[in-house]
Image: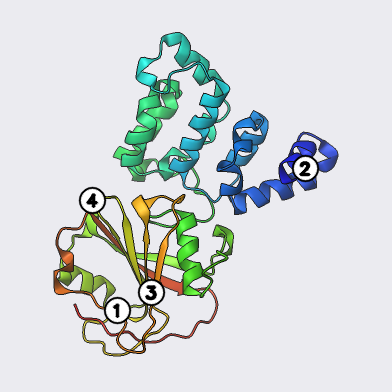
Amino acid sequence: NFYRILDFAFGRIAYKPLQDYCLGAICADPSSVFDSDYFYCMDVNMLTSLLKRDDLGIDEVELWNNVIKWGFVQNPTLFEDPAKWTPEFTATFQQSLADCIPLIRFTLMTPAQFREKVWPFKDILPADLYDSVLWYFLMPEAQSNLFTPRLKTIDSKLITLKQAAMIASWIDQKDDKFYTYTEIPYDFTLLMRGSEDGYSQNILHQRCGGQEKTFLLLKIKTTQEIFGMYISGIWNVTASARAHDSFMFSFSEGKETTKPVLSRVRSSGYDLALSRGMDRGMGELEMFKVSPKFGVSSTSLPLTL
């Protein structure tokens, strides 16, 4: 059992290589531990060892959420709503997470994530740390070295690293066994973000026209569902060709825990099309270029925009 091996090896100097191997395995597939009951029984020293890792492949806001859940398990008598805590409750929870909080890289979150997930617990953060993070969000250029990034990231507000690994797997026809985040053989470059660049067709064509191997993400405001489309060929308004390896997908409510839906092209005709009205009514939009780290052949795709 992996967890028993980890428990045995951790804290024993003679088994340091085994500790490092186990921690590396967790970093490569964080859900194997963070989504298990074992996580809540994890020793604080083991948890902080994970939080220190630069190769921990989990979004920072998700990491924070898990650390908070771990803290509640250590303090089962506390209300889950920090607004109802007495000063004594706050001090107790703060003490439980005292070694963990400085290791969370808060500036890797978006301001919205920080406001929604961290701000309710602001009283457990050291005052100087809280102030530094706020200043970073106000003046990021002046606080650029506050926290170092973890090694593998994707510049997206819509999907997680785990979901990015799924998309990379689908690109390579790996529909059943997904890459872990460290195995992703592509670099994802953000071409446009609707909330910052706007949703007009002109901007879409300016930023994305002529690009090969791209995928588009849309988030629906009312349902929080994320829909995506991978375009294996050239993003071109006048393109007229076929690409059997393009596909569409969705993540229900944007959650990793829900099984995603994948739809591949089955017929030999034109496979994917976008209507001219696609720039209206979006909750969010992001467009990425997929750059393979290894040689991958390309095809073209017919689009109607």
Residue shown at the point (79%, 39%) measured from the top left: 9
Task: Examine the rendering and report whether any part of residue 157 can be seen.
Answer: no
Give the CA distance from mark 3 to mark 1.
8 Å
Graded by Cα atoms within 10 Å as few (under 14), some (14 to 19) or many (20 or more), the crowding at tag 3 reads many
Residue shown at the point (64%, 29%) measured from the top left: 44
Quarter of the image where one finds residue 217: bottom left
Q: Label 2, on which residue?
A: 5
Identify the disc placed on residue 221. Answer: 4
Q: Position of residue 179 (x, y in %)?
A: 56, 64
Whether 97 is drawn above or below 266: the answer is: above
For the residues bearing labels 1 and 4, Cβ distance under 8 angstroms: no
Q: Position of residue 124 (x, y in %)?
A: 45, 22
Graded by Cα atoms within 10 Å as few (under 14), some (14 to 19) or many (20 or more), the crowding at tag 1 reads many
Task: Examine the rendering and report whether any part of residue 197 can be seen.
Answer: yes
Residue shown at the point (50%, 62%) measured from the top left: 165
Q: Position of residue 262 (x, y in %)?
A: 41, 67
Q: Position of residue 40 (x, y in %)?
A: 59, 32
Tell me: 109 left or right of 198: right
Quarter of the image where one finds residue 184: bottom right
Residue shown at the point (26%, 87%) measured from the top left: 239
Q: Secondary structure at mark 2?
A: helix
Quarter of the image where one finds residue 142: top left
Instruction: Report the quarter where the C terminus lies.
Output: bottom left
Give the CA distance from mark 3 to mark 4.
23 Å
Q: Of the two numbered discs 2 and 1 on the same chain, state the one appearing first in sequence.
A: 2
Amino acid carrying label 1: it is Leu
Q: Label 3, on which residue?
A: 247
For the residues bearing labels 3 and 4, Cβ distance under 8 angstroms: no
Give the CA distance from mark 2 to mark 3.
41 Å
Q: Of the two numbered discs 1 and 4 on the same chain, state the one appearing first in sequence.
A: 4
Q: Label 1, on which residue?
A: 272
For the residues bearing labels 2 and 1, Cβ distance under 8 angstroms: no
